[in-house]
């Protein structure tokens, strides 16, 4: 493969995306692809410190400050980890990316979405995922799966989760070619098979174009 592939995994808390990411990584590695698993916020180094601030700081955090911290993490992550890997031909599987900011800080917190889009573009330098897998889960199930041990974002409550979920679905409606929606009420194996057929189709398109 000449250039790698950038696949992002999105969805509300407790949607099961991390399980699907790991299953896909295992499958691709067995097929001989070079795969990198990463995440936002907080892949390595500076990002880990930003993640700690974002998720565990227990005093008030301004909504703009929250957004800038996610965006700062993203800028560092894209420049130092994702871009170099894509240039080496790696398939990058990333747990959350730009759509999380639009869904959580935009639809969830109510910040201006056009402005957040511009800030996302600034943070990524305009780089977009080749494919985004969105795992849709109803907000009651989402809260149940998260359980009692909640971080700062998960503690925002069910009404917040509902806004985030609707935000994600809106994003998928606007960009159906990039964002594919999966119904998280299905079994892990069913979802894995659906993910595989979506990813195989994208790989096929890329291989036939090179
Ligand atoms: P994490 O423990 O990674 O949650 P999950 O396993 O559900 O991905 O925590 C990340 C939290 O940060 C999650 O609640 C979503 C939130 N988030 C935002 O609000 N905005 C963002 O831009 C990103 C990347 C994450």
Image (cartoon, rainbow, N blue to C red):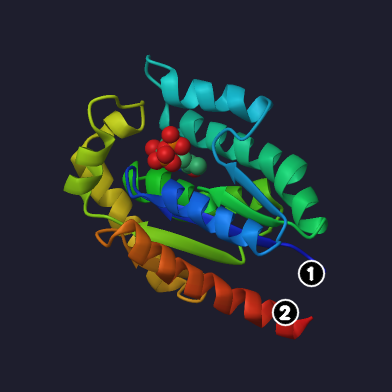
Q: CA distance from mark 2 to mark 1?
A: 7 Å
- For label 1, the SS is loop
Count neighbours of disc 2 (C-alpha within 10 A) and say few if under 14, some if 14 to 19, many if 20 or more.
Answer: few
> Mark 2 and 1 residues: CB-CB less than 8 Å, in contact?
yes
Q: What residue is rendered at 64% in x and 74% in y?
A: 203
Is 67 on the left or on the right of 154, as rendered? right
- On the image, numbered disc 2 is attached to which residue? 207
Seen as rendered, the residue at the extreme left is 140
- For label 2, the SS is helix
Is 201 on the left or on the right of 82, as rendered? left
Q: Quadrant of ligand 1?
A: top left
Is 92 on the left or on the right of 87, as rendered? left
Specify the label residue 1 is tagged with: 1
The percent position of residue 14, horizontal first and vertical second, equals 32, 43
Which is more N-terminal, label 1 or label 2?
1
Count neighbours of disc 1 (C-alpha within 10 A) and say few if under 14, some if 14 to 19, many if 20 or more.
Answer: some
Is 55 on the left or on the right of 26, as rendered? left
The percent position of residue 156, horizontal first and vertical second, equals 27, 33
Q: What residue is rendered at 46% in x and 67% in y?
A: 195
Q: Nearer the viewer, residue 159 or 200?
A: 200
């Amino acid at each position: 493969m000449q250039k790698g592939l950038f696949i992002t995994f999105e969805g509300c808390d407790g949607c099961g995306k991390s399980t699907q990411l790991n299953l896909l990584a295992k499958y691709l590695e067995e097929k001989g692809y070079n795969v990198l698993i990463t995440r936002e916020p907080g892949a390595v180094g500076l990002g880990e410190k930003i993640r700690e601030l974002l998720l565990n700081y227990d005093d008030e955090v301004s909504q703009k400050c929250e957004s800038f911290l996610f965006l700062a993490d993203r800028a560092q992550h894209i420049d130092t980890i994702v871009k170099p890997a894509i240039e080496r031909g790696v398939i990058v599987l990333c747990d959350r990316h730009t759509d999380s900011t639009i869904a959580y800080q935009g639809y969830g917190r109510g910040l201006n979405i056009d402005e957040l889009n511009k800030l996302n573009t600034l943070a990524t330098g305009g780089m977009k995922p080749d494919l985004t897998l969105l795992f849709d889960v109803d907000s009651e199930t989402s809260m149940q799966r998260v359980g009692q041990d909640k971080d700062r974002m998960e503690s925002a409550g069910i009404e917040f989760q509902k806004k985030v979920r609707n935000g994600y679905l809106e994003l998928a409606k606007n960009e159906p070619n990039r964002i594919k929606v999966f119904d998280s009420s299905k079994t892990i194996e069913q979802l894995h098979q659906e993910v595989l057929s979506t990813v195989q189709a994208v790989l096929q398109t890329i291989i036939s174009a090179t």
